[in-house]
Amino acid sequence: MRLLLAFLFLPVLYVQAQYTSLSDHPVHYSLAYTDTSSGSSIDTSQLLSDYNYSYSTFSPKDGNSLLGKLRQRNYGAQLGFQRGAYNFLEMGFEHHWRTISLFKPRMFSVGGSFGYNFWDNTAEYKVGVWYKAGRIALTYGANLVYATNFKQGKLGVAPVVGFRLLGFHLTTGYNAFFNGDEEFKEYNQFYVSLRYFFPIDNTFKWKKKNKGKDKKEFRWPWQKK
């Protein structure tokens, strides 16, 4: 009985040993087999080389894993409150592009807002961008700002740093005005703002990492091209 089992498993062990050696050194080995229908002999060294290239194309070692990346795109409205020398109620919109990843998530946003100070009859208009790299990380951005009391106005830029979590976005910034009326004082130069984002539409898309110039369809050595 033991002799029979050894006889049955011996071919399996031999094939496994040959496959292991060919995987380690695919260039130095060449196999040939005969097609029973045509009687022609086929050299498999080129087939093994193609197989090795196809496998390496999808190998995680060179970053071309089949897992890919999950992309999210959404837009929606936001409401907030700005606190400084003067207080503003804010409302606006934002459009987000996000790469969802376990280790290196990223997020980019474009948006605009309108703020109004009821007590001093002052309004502000902003358009801006911000970027976040990491799961627990700060956001960095900038706004183009126009402020007016409906008699005078100022135009400027505002670098912004913040922290975003669960739809809430806490930011602080500095309004650097480069054009406008100097006598217009009823506006914040330094400020802190807290906003909440209400998503209206969410779109998810799976992007494969192997998409590109080096993309090659996987085929076994015995499959026809």
Image (cartoon, rainbow, N blue to C red):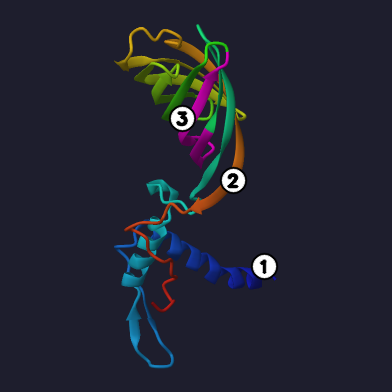
Whether 91 is drawn above or below 31: the answer is above
For residue 34, say whether it is visible: yes
Whether 124 is drawn above or below 40: the answer is above
In this view of the protein, which residue sits in the foreground, 92 or 21?
A: 92
Identity, as a three-letter code, of the amino acid under mark 3: Lys
Closer mark to the observer between disc 1 and disc 2: 2
Please say whether residue 104 is one of the residues in the magenta stretch.
yes
Of pointers 1 and 2, the one earlier in the residue sequence: 1
Q: CA distance from mark 2 to mark 3?
A: 20 Å
Residue 201 image label? 2
Percent x, y of residue 31:
36, 73
Percent x, y of residue 54:
39, 62
Q: Which residues are magenta?
A: 93-118
Residue 80 horizontal side relative to residue 207, left or right: right
Percent x, y of residue 166:
62, 29
Q: Residues within 10 Å of mark 2 (few under 14, many from 20)?
A: few
The residue singled out by tag 3 in the image is: 132
**Residue 117, picture quadrant:** top right
Looking at the rendering, in which quadrant would you find the N terminus?
bottom right
The residue most toward the right is: 1
Identity, as a three-letter code, of the amino acid under mark 1: Arg
The residue most toward the bottom is: 38
Residue 47 horizontal side relative to residue 132, left or right: left
Residue 2 image label? 1
**Residue 211, picture quadrant:** bottom left
Of pointers 2 and 3, the one earlier in the residue sequence: 3
- The answer to the question of whether label 1 and label 2 lie on touching residues, with beta carbons closer than 8 A, is no
